[in-house]
Amino acid sequence: MSYYSRIIGTGKGLPETVMTNKDFESFIDTSDEWIRTRTGISERRIANYEKGETTLSLSRLAALQAIEKAGISPQDLGLIIVGSVTPESVMPTTANSLQRDLGAVNAFSFDLQAACSGFLYGLSIADQYIRSGTIKTALVVGAETLSTLVNWQDRSTCILFGDGAGAAVLTRSEDKTHAILSTRLYSDGTRGDLLKVSHGYAACPPWRADYRPSEHKIQMQGSDIFKLAVRNMVEASNKVLEDNQLTIKDVDFFIFHQANIRIIEMCAKTLNVPLEKTWINVDKYGNTSAATLPICLDEAWRANAIKPGDKVLMATFGGGITWGATLIQL
Ligand code: COA
């Protein structure tokens, strides 16, 4: 008997507070016009710690929606994975705290770090566990509060990111057509310096004399990252198509990592995909890292932009660097 994974529910969780481009003008040398034309971002959501908005609370919102849409109970979950570079705490993991909050007593759970690719990495791991028959149903979350990790004085990065979470429930199916068809994941640690958070962990813990708080923030070589993001997402997309002997024309809908509208447009142009066949929300949320793909998937599904039977290609790119693509049929 062969098993496959079918996505049966999605959800999202976003902070209430909206931060507009104009809001940056009071503390860094920038403008709404610069941010919109260079990135396509108009606003982003920022978690309010005082109101209890954290990586965990956003994960919980997304997870509860996904579980409800899937029509399962938390006890049906055998695995919970949270992809995040801004976990609630290192120990317990965000996934363990989520497991507790959901009452998902039959699930084992862990966090994974693959930067913006965290959701796709998690989806692929859950898919492997389901295909092997080890578990039946899994919850995969991409969740970030990047507002805690940006340098608010660095105008080239702080304007890019936002907070949010997205989630998907996958379950075992014997139908290989309505399933995750294939996934390709990639890493290149030799280019890790292009987008990094270098201090604050084992290489330079906070108690060392040379620790600098400003290095415990996102640092990025923007234009190198831009080019790699386009090239790698295009290559990964072509690979998953090849794996399934399909062409771009066979795919109904595309979801690219939401980092910058120009990156999305260049991926679409290079692949010859009309923008109408993609979901775009980078204007509203900025780059929410591991959360961008599941938030888009959820919004596109609930808006009927995608429907059961559609083939959907998702591609991602993240710091460190990581990237990948997956092709699913809903
Ligand atoms: N407001 C105004 N000016 C800004 C600015 C801001 N927020 N941020 C940077 N600038 C300035 C720079 O200082 C530079 O000025 P200079 O020429 O006097 O040195 C100028 O704008 C051009 O900077 P540059 O970095 O060449 O701009 P760009 O067109 O490459 O756009 C990014 C910058 C960050 C928007 C772009 O490189 C990008 O989106 N990269 C990818 C980011 C990304 O996707 N990261 C996450 C991947 S998961």
Image (tube, rainbow, N blue to C red):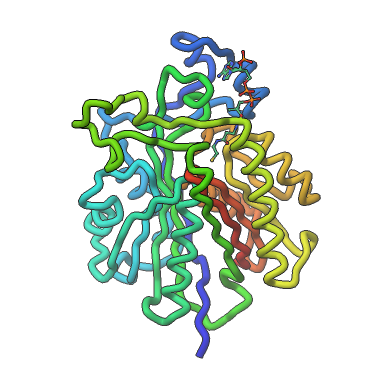
| Residue found at the far bottom of this picture | 1
Q: Position of residue 316 (x, y in %)?
A: 57, 50
Image x and y of residue 7, in percent: 51, 66
Q: Which quarter of the rendered picture does the C terminus lie within? A: bottom right
Tell me which residue sits at (52%, 34%) in the image.
285
Spot the residue most to the left: 207
119 w.r.t. 139: above or below: above
Residue at x-position 64% and y-position 50%: 233
Left or right placement of residue 19 versus residue 35 in this view: left
Give the left or right position of residue 82, taking residue 178 as reference: left
At which x and y percent is residue 224? 62, 35
Report the side of 90 relative to 1 (left or right).
left
**Looking at the picture, does residue 125 appear above or below residue 83?**
below
Q: Hey, which quadrant is residue 56 in on the image?
A: top left
Q: Is residue 147 visible?
A: no
Q: Give coordinates of residue 326: x percent, y percent.
A: 59, 61
Tally of marks: 0
Residue 117 or 67: which is nearer the viewer? 117
Q: Nearer the viewer, residue 218 or 97?
A: 218
Residue depicted at x 33% and y 55%: 111
* Observer-nearest of 79 and 29: 29
Q: Is residue 43 visible?
A: yes
Q: Is residue 254 above or below residue 217?
A: below
Q: Residue at x 55, y 31 (%)?
A: 221
Quadrant holding ligand 1? top right
* Camera-nearest residue between 139 and 112: 112
